[in-house]
Amino acid sequence: MSKEQSKFGRRYDEDFKCQAVEWIETQQRSIRDLSRERGVSEWSLARWCKQQAEGAAAGGPPAAATLEAEVARLRREVEVVSRQRDILSLNRAMFFLR
């Protein structure tokens, strides 16, 4: 998971925060529902949404950290999909060799 424990409580990485805000915005979900589903406090989710809205209102380009997090997330996703494809093609080849 994308959280680590500290003496003050859970810490979430920027990728997880951006993804949570995206879920709220794109899926039209309430903060309360997502809070219960993901185990994150409503206060944290509301703060992340507010921070992202303030950043978007500034009109500047997305923060470099946000872009780097998005690139890292996409690279992980490509890696997973590539592995799935390789496994399926291997299974297919073994099926036809029988």
Image: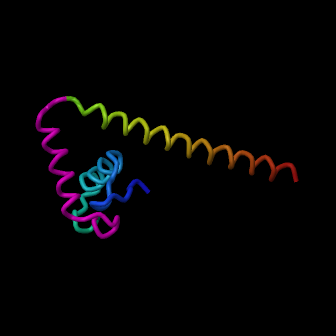
Q: Residue furthest front?
A: 7
**Image-quadrant location for residue 41:** bottom left
**Image-quadrant location for residue 11:** bottom left
Q: Which quarter of the image is occupied by the C terminus?
A: bottom right
Percent of width and height locating residue 58? 11, 34
Q: Which quarter of the image is occupied by the N terminus?
A: bottom left
**Image-quadrant location for residue 44:** bottom left
Question: For the point 33% across and 67% down, which residue is it?
Answer: 39
Question: For the point 33% across and 58% down, which residue is it?
Answer: 6
Percent of width and height locating residue 89? 71, 45
Q: Residue furthest bottom?
A: 36
State the residue in front, 9 or 76: 9
Q: Which residues are magenta?
A: 35-60
Percent of width and height locating residue 4? 38, 56
Question: For the point 31% across and 60% down, which residue is it?
Answer: 7
Magenta stretch contains residue 40: yes
| Number of marks in the rendered image | 0
Q: Seen in the image, is 47 located left or right of residue 11? A: left
Please, which colouring scheme is shown? rainbow
Q: On screen, 19 above or below 67?
A: below
State the residue in front, 13 or 85: 13
Q: Seen in the image, is 56 located left or right of residue 64? A: left
Question: For the point 27% across and 66% down, which residue is it?
Answer: 35
Q: On screen, 50 above or below 41?
A: above
Principal secondary structure, stretch drawn in magenta = helix
State the residue in front, 27 or 72: 72
Percent of width and height locating residue 72? 43, 38
Q: Seen in the image, is 95 located left or right of residue 41? A: right
State the residue in front, 83 or 6: 6
